[in-house]
């Protein structure tokens, strides 16, 4: 799957509202695909915060689902890959 930072993904927020995210990167890792998303401004989410989701494939791209990565070790590993791959595109900080 290919995404670029101009791709916009719409996900449902915790309150059921739609949240628009900018696609920053997509990484295949250990048999799964992960995407790095940042909420567009004024979406009610923390600005400049990057969220990592595992892509759950459907029959078509429209049927795909996204599951937030909650495993801290996996999240750290993926974030390292992301920062190395994108060091020339983004200034990244880790909490």
Image: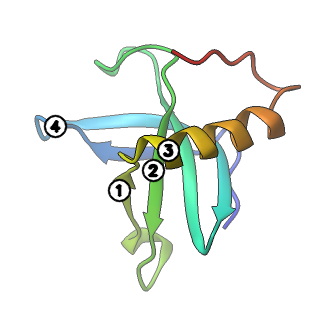
**Residue 50, position as x, y percentages in the image:** 51, 29
* Element type at mark 2: strand
* Residue that badge 1 annotates: 67
Disc 2 crowd rating (10 Å Cα; few below 14, some 14-19, many 20+) is some
Quarter of image, res 45: top left
Q: How many neighbours does mark 4 have within 10 angstroms: few (below 14), some (14-19), or many (20 or more)?
A: few
Most extreme residue toward the bottom is 59
Q: Quick one: 75 or 3, which is closer to the camera?
A: 75
- Sequence-first disc among 2 and 4: 4
Q: Are marks 1 and 2 in contact (CB under 8 Å)?
A: yes
Where is mark 2, residue-wise? 53
CA distance for labels 1 and 2: 5 Å
First in residue order: circle 1 vs circle 3: 1
Q: Which mark is residue 14?
A: 4
In this view, the mark in front (4 or 1): 1
Up-down relation of residue 24 to residue 87 (above or below) = below
| Residue on which disc 3 sits | 73
Mark 2 vs mark 4, foreground winner is: 2
The answer for how far apart the CA atoms under marks 4 and 1 are is 13 Å
The answer to the question of whether label 4 and label 3 lie on touching residues, with beta carbons closer than 8 A, is no
Q: Is residue 6 above or below residue 34?
A: above
Residue 93 % position (x, y): 63, 15
- Gap between marks 1 and 3, in whole Å? 16 Å
**Residue 61 coordinates in the image, percent (x, y):** 49, 72
- Element under disc 3: helix
Percent across and percent down for residue 42 are 36, 14
> Which sits earlier in the primary sequence, circle 3 or circle 2?
2
CA distance for labels 4 and 3: 24 Å
Instruction: Tell which residue pokes out farthest to the left in this image.
Output: 15
């Amino acid at each position: 799957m290919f995404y670029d930072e101009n791709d916009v993904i719409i996900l449902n927020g915790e309150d059921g509202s739609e949240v628009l995210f900018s696609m920053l990167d997509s990484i295949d890792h250990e048999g799964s695909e992960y995407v790095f998303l940042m909420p567009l401004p004024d979406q009610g989410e923390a600005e400049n915060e990057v969220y990592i989701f595992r892509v759950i494939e459907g029959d078509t791209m429209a049927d795909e689902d996204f599951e937030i990565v909650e495993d801290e070790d996996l999240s750290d590993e993926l974030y390292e890959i992301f920062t190395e791959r994108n060091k020339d595109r983004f200034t990244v900080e880790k909490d």
